[in-house]
Image: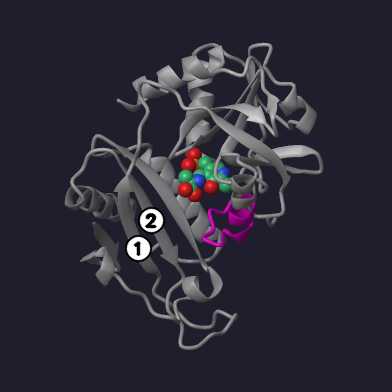
C-alpha cells in the first residue's frame, strides 16, 4: 500500500503529518473519493472540478494544476498495482505555527492520497436498507469537507438500527444519504432533490441523471417529501463507492416491490456499459 504525501510516495505506515496540521486540529480541509475501473479514473475531470470548487469555497489555493493531479493519480494507481481502486484524495490548509482559528499565515496545503481496493458488482446489483433520520449537519453540505462528524453520527445511528444507510431530511424534505445521494421513481419518472447547499453534488448523481435522460426517462430535480419517498415505486442511493444501490426497505417499510426495480435495473446496466 503506497501513499502519496506532499510529493512523496511512501509506505502507509511511514506517511505522517504534523499535530499542527489544520486538518488534524480543525478539520480544515476537503476531500474526494475517485473510483478507478481497470486502472482508469472515472469522471476525473468532474472530480477535479469539484475539488477546485471546494478549495475555492475555503480560500485554499489549489496546490496543483489538473495535469499535475492527473500525473499524481496515475502514478499512485501504478504503484498500487492498478485494477479497480478507490482513490481517497485529501487537501488540508496546511501546518500552522500554533493552534489559531484565525488564518493569518500563508500556508502550504497538505496533500495526501491513498488507494484502496474497490469492490465492483458488475453482474448483480446490491440492495440495501435505510432509516430516515433528521439531517443534523451544517448548511454547506455542497463542500466535501473532511469535517464529517454529523455524517458519522448519522451513519452509525443507522448501523445501530441494523440499516445500511441513513437517508436524511430537513423540514420534512429529503436531502441525501449520510454518504450518498438519493433518487426515487414514481410512475416511471425519476426524482432527486435539487443541487443546492444542502447536498453534495455527487459525481455519480450527475452520471445517473445523464444516463436516465439518454434513455428517455424524465428526470425531476425537485424537492421530495418524506411521504413521497415512502410511497415511491423505487428508491436508490448513489455514490462513487456504491454506484446505484436500490433501497428496498426504509425503517422496515417495504419500498415498491421490495426488489430491485425496473428503472434501477436498466440504469445499473447502462452504468456498467458507460464505465467501459
Ligand atoms: N461519499 N453525499 C454525501 C454526503 C457523500 O459523502 C457522497 C460520497 C455523495 C456521493 O458523491 P459521489 O457520487 O461524488 O461519490 C453524496 C464518498 C464516496 C465517501 O465519503 O466515501
Viewer-proximal residue, 179 or 166? 166
User: CB under 8 Å between callouts 2 and 1?
Assistant: yes
Residue furthest to the bottom in view is 98
The relative height of residue 224 versus residue 111 in the rendered view (above or below) is above
Q: Residues within 10 Å of mark 1 (few under 14, many from 20)?
A: many
Q: Visible in this render: residue 177?
A: yes
Viewer-proximal residue, 99 or 86? 86
Specify the quadrant that holds the C terminus. top left
The residue wearing badge 2 is 89
Residue at x-position 32% and y-position 56%: 114
Name the element at disc 1: strand
Viewer-proximal residue, 188 or 58? 188
The tag earlier along the polypeptide, 2 or 1, is 2
What percent of the width, then of the height, locates residue 108? 39, 74
Specify the quadrant that holds the N terminus. bottom left
Residue at x-position 28% and y-position 49%: 70
Q: Which mark is residue 166?
A: none
Task: Write down the region rendered in magenta.
Answer: 142-154
What percent of the width, then of the height, locates residue 103? 55, 79
Would you identify the image quadrant in which residue 7 lies?
bottom left
276 in the magenta segment: no
The residue wearing badge 1 is 112
Residue at x-position 34% and y-position 49%: 87
Name the element at disc 2: strand
Amino acid at each position: 500500500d503506497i501513499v502519496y504525501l506532499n510529493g512523496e510516495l511512501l509506505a502507509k505506515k511511514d506517511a505522517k503529518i504534523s499535530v499542527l496540521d489544520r486538518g488534524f486540529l480543525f478539520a480544515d480541509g476537503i476531500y474526494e473519493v475517485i473510483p478507478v475501473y481497470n486502472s482508469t479514473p472515472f469522471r476525473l475531470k468532474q472530480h477535479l472540478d469539484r475539488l477546485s470548487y471546494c478549495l475555492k469555497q475555503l480560500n485554499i489555493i489549489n496546490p496543483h494544476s489538473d495535469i499535475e493531479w492527473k500525473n499524481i493519480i496515475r502514478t499512485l494507481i501504478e504503484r498500487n498495482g492498478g485494477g479497480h481502486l478507490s482513490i481517497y484524495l485529501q487537501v488540508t490548509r496546511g501546518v500552522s505555527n500554533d493552534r489559531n482559528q484565525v488564518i493569518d499565515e500563508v500556508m502550504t496545503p497538505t496533500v495526501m492520497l491513498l488507494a484502496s481496493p474497490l469492490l465492483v458488482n458488475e453482474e448483480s446489483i446490491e440492495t440495501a436498507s435505510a432509516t430516515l433520520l433528521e439531517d443534523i449537519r451544517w448548511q454547506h453540505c455542497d463542500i466535501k469537507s473532511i469535517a464529517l462528524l454529523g455524517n458519522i453520527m448519522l451513519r452509525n445511528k443507522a448501523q445501530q438500527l441494523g440499516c445500511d444507510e441513513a437517508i436524511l431530511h430537513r423540514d420534512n424534505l429529503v436531502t441525501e444519504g449520510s454518504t450518498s445521494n438519493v433518487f426515487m421513481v414514481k410512475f416511471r419518472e425519476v426524482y432527486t432533490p435539487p443541487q443546492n447547499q444542502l447536498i453534495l453534488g455527487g459525481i455519480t448523481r450527475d452520471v445517473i441523471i445523464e444516463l436516465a435522460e439518454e434513455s428517455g426517462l424524465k428526470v425531476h430535480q425537485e424537492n421530495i417529501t418524506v411521504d413521497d419517498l415512502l410511497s415511491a415505486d423505487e428508491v436508490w442511493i448513489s455514490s462513487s463507492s456504491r454506484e446505484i444501490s436500490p433501497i428496498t426497505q426504509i425503517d422496515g417499510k417495504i419500498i415498491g416491490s421490495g426488489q430491485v426495480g425496473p428503472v434501477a435495473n436498466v440504469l445499473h446496466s447502462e452504468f456498467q456499459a458507460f464505465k467501459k
